[in-house]
Image (cartoon, rainbow, N blue to C red):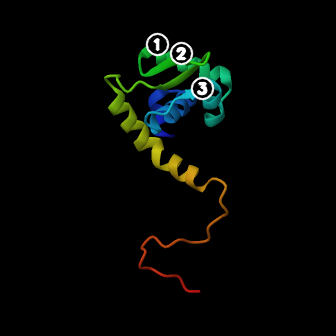
Amino acid sequence: MDPLRALVTSEARARVLTALFIDRGRSYYKTELAQKTQLPLMAVQRELRRMVDAGIVRSRALAGRTMYAAAEDSAIYPELRGIVAKLRGPARRLQDALAGTRAVAAVPLDPRERFLE
């Protein structure tokens, strides 16, 4: 089982936390979070409400819509961001970097290493 999922007891909450805490300073509309996390809008709304009430996510109105971001002034922000980065960060970054690319046959891990052609 994914450690973050076990820690927060909800895959929806883990996905929303990941989206909000991986990209420092980034704000999202609810619909953006629903697309990014591939969750129903109602699930995103429920998790955002809980996180705002807990003080780990902040909301602000912008042009008649509400945006959400990690509450960087929260007492537990550094720890929570660190946990999310350790448990979901590298995999997410790699997935985003490779999205839309064709399959790679092999890549040397050591730049001095060469493959036979």
Q: Are marks 2 and 3 in contact (CB under 8 Å)?
A: no
Give the foreground label among 2 and 3: 3
In-front residue for pair 95/72: 72
User: Mark number for residue 29?
Assistant: 3
What amino acid is found at the position of numbered circle 2 in the picture? Arg
**In the rendered image, which residue does mark 1 sit on?**
53
**In the rendered image, which residue does mark 2 sit on?**
49
**Looking at the image, how many numbered discs can be counted on the residues?**
3
Residue 92 image point, x, y percent: 53, 46
Image position of 113 with respect to 84: above or below: below
| Sooner in the amino-acid sequence: mark 2 or mark 3 | 3
- Residue at 60% of width from left, 26% of height from top? 29
Residue 30 image point, x, y percent: 61, 24
Q: Residue furthest left?
A: 75
Q: Are marks 2 and 1 in contact (CB under 8 Å)?
A: yes
Image position of 46 with respect to 109: above or below: above
Residue 36 image point, x, y percent: 62, 36
- Residue at 55% of width from left, 86% of height from top? 116
- Residue at 48% of width from left, 42% of height from top? 88
